[in-house]
Image (cartoon, rainbow, N blue to C red):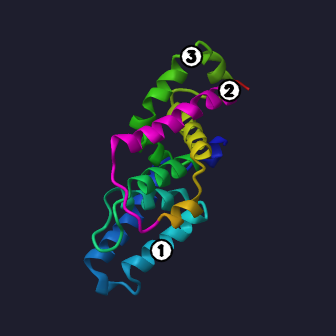
Amino acid sequence: MEKEDFITKKDAFEGFTRLRRVLNDCLENPRQYAKSFMDMITDVGTLAMDGNAIAQDVMSYYYKDGVKKYIPENYDLYMQWAILAAANGNEFTIEKLQFFLNYAFDEIVNSAKLPQILAKNGIDETNYIYVLGNLLCEGIVDEMQITAKKLVEMQGQTSKYSPEKLREYKRALDKALPKVLDFLLA
């Protein structure tokens, strides 16, 4: 992925906020909208399936805690939509995943080959979180075989957070990390 493929943090945040505001307003004032919340979230899901990284982040947001009567809480959908959005270059989502990705960032930064990695990939203090976060999430997508189609098929299911679930994502990150390092050094 190249820099021009990224959605800047500012643009991603504004798009996310705008979509969330409309969807939340539709929940609070349904009579003011021609479409129901479910029709609107389905439209966002269609955008997410088409690779729209802002829509993918919005889908992640609504699955984190669920929406009473409409969307069940689903930790797997929350994480996987977020990881997919980050893999698709959403800088705002990458920042939200930073805590989860942090130890992998540390492994790369503490690598003896860091000067080579930085020089070969045009990475500096202004973009390292985005470039590395994007690549790590691409690796997780590959490891877990995450696709938008699979995520849509998982809708309607409930999945609560548990330490074991988090470990599944950490294991995928562990498997992705050496591949990302190899890619950065290639």
Cα distance in 3D space between marks 2 and 3: 12 Å
Which residue in the structure is indicated by mark 2? 182
Question: Which span of residues is magenta-colored?
Answer: 155-184
Q: Residue at x 31, y 67 (%)?
A: 67
- In the image, what residue type sits under mark 3? Ser
Q: Position of residue 165 (x, y in %)?
A: 40, 44
Q: Identify whether 106 is placed above or below 17.
A: above
Answer with mark 1 or mark 2, whichever residue precedes in sequence.
1
Cα distance in 3D space between marks 1 and 2: 39 Å
Residue neighbourhood size for the residue with mark 3, other residues' Cα within 10 Å, grouped as few (<14), some (14–19), many (≥20): few
Q: Nearer the viewer, residue 170 or 84?
A: 170
Q: Nearer the viewer, residue 161 or 129?
A: 161
Answer with mark 3 or mark 1, whichever residue precedes in sequence.
1
Q: Identify whether 87 is placed above or below 23.
A: above
> Does residue 135 show up magenta in the picture?
no
Residue neighbourhood size for the residue with mark 1, other residues' Cα within 10 Å, grouped as few (<14), some (14–19), many (≥20): some
- In the image, what residue type sits under mark 2? Asp
Let me know if residue 32 appears in the view.
Answer: yes
Q: Which mark is residue 42?
A: 1
Which quadrant of the figure has residue 114? top right
Q: Residue at x 46, y 34 (%)?
A: 101
Quadrant showing the N terminus: top right
Which residue in the structure is indicated by mark 3? 111
